[in-house]
Image: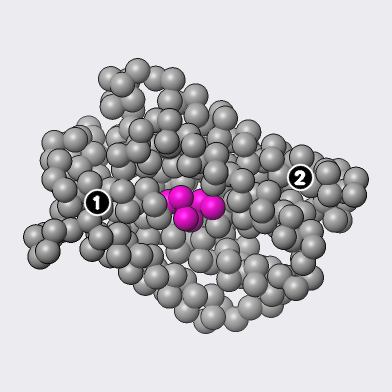
């Protein structure tokens, strides 16, 4: 029972601490937020791709449960197709009959049509799904560490919280860009963070039975992040073609990737 309390306490810390720090972004004025969100979207691209290719997929391949690289690739492909279909379903639900031409995301707020709002909302929904899966897996990892050693569990939970902060900043940027109000963005991120506790509790009682699924859960989470970054965010960055804007985007994408790389290495 004492171990379970440790796990619950630090799962809450790992999930909610990063949200609390990232939510300070919501304290900015509307003007400051409107200027900052496009930059954070670029940062989010780097963070999402970095988390996928530098963290989730390598961990799936290196997991103690041996998995075939071809199976990982197939799972990644099916995950991308799954999130494509999920986004289509969200768009179909919002479209009026056959008046649904495709549009790129508009980071500057210059185009406000019904389809674009639906597409942006779909991106926000997908990032919440992917983040919840990622938080769920984090809870499993926290439980596994605590079941090995309490001190290791504490270090792991704190490291996961630090790792999540830049990603949560990106999530807030995506949700705000998707049309969520600041209060709802915070609310849904808090709910998503509780996935850490859910994963930790489920792992505590059924860890032995879930080990063989963990690599595939990691890959599905990676596929959601890759899809949002490549299909929904990167096309919108091309709306600004000025050299200065392009250089800023490249720098922020690199910053997001480097931040994930540094925090990931800290875990080791």
- Residue, x 33% and y 25% (percent of image)? 33
Q: At numbered mark 2, what does the secondary structure look like: helix, strand or loop?
A: helix
Q: Position of residue 45 (x, y in %)?
A: 38, 47
Identify residue for label 2. 8
- Residue sitting nearer the eye, 221 or 166: 221
Tell me: 53 left or right of 152.
Answer: left
Q: Residue furthest right?
A: 2
Provide residue 163's location: percent of width, then percent of height: 60, 42
Q: Which residue is mark 1?
A: 118
- Which residues are drawn in magenta? 127-132
Q: Do the residues under discs 2 and 1 have CB atoms within 8 angstroms? A: no
Determine the secondary structure under disc 1.
helix
User: Mark 2 or 1 closer to N-term?
Assistant: 2
| Image mark count | 2
Q: Which mark is residue 167?
A: none
User: Which secondary structure is most common in the magenta stretch?
Assistant: helix
Residue count near mark 1 (Cα–Cα under 10 Å), binned few <14, some 14–19, many ≥20 = many
Residue at point 55%, 57% (across, down): 133
Nearest the viewer among 265 and 77 is 77
The image shows residue 91, relative to residue 190, as above or below, that is: below
Is there any visible trace of residue 107 in the rendered image? Answer: yes
Q: Position of residue 15 (x, y in %)?
A: 63, 41
Q: Is residue 97 magenta?
A: no
Inter-mark Cα distance, 2 to 1: 37 Å
The answer to whether 49 appears left or right of 215 in the picture is: left
Query: Vertical placement of 83 versus 244: above or below?
Result: below
Left or right of 254? Residue 164 is: right
Which residue is rendered at x = 28% and y = 48% of the image? 120
93 to 74, vertically: above or below: above
Drawn side of residue 211 relative to residue 262, left or right? right
């Amino acid at each position: 029972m004492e171990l379970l309390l440790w796990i619950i306490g630090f799962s809450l810390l790992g999930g909610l601490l990063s949200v609390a720090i990232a939510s300070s972004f919501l304290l900015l004025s509307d003007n400051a937020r409107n200027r900052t969100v496009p930059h954070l979207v670029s940062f989010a691209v780097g963070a999402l791709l970095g988390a996928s290719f530098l963290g989730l997929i390598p961990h799936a391949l290196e997991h103690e449960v041996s998995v075939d690289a071809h199976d990982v690739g197939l799972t990644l492909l099916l995950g991308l197709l799954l999130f494509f279909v999920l986004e289509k379903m969200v768009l179909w639900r919002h479209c009026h009959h056959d008046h649904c031409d495709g549009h790129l995301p508009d980071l500057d707020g210059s185009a406000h049509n019904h389809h674009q709002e639906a597409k942006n909302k779909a991106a926000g929904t997908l990032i919440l799904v992917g983040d919840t899966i990622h938080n769920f897996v984090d809870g499993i990892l926290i439980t596994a560490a605590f079941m090995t050693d309490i001190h290791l569990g504490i270090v792991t939970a704190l490291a996961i919280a630090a790792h999540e902060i830049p990603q949560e900043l990106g999530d807030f940027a995506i949700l705000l860009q998707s049309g969520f109000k600041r209060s709802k963005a915070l609310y849904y991120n808090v709910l998503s963070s509780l996935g850490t506790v859910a994963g930790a509790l489920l792992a505590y009682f059924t860890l032995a039975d879930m080990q063989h699924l963990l690599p595939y859960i990691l890959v599905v989470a990676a596929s959601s992040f890759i899809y949002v970054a490549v299909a929904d965010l990167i096309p919108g960055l091309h709306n600004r073609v000025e050299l200065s804007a392009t250089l800023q985007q490249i720098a922020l994408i690199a910053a997001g990737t480097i931040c994930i790389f540094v925090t990931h290495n800290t875990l080791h």
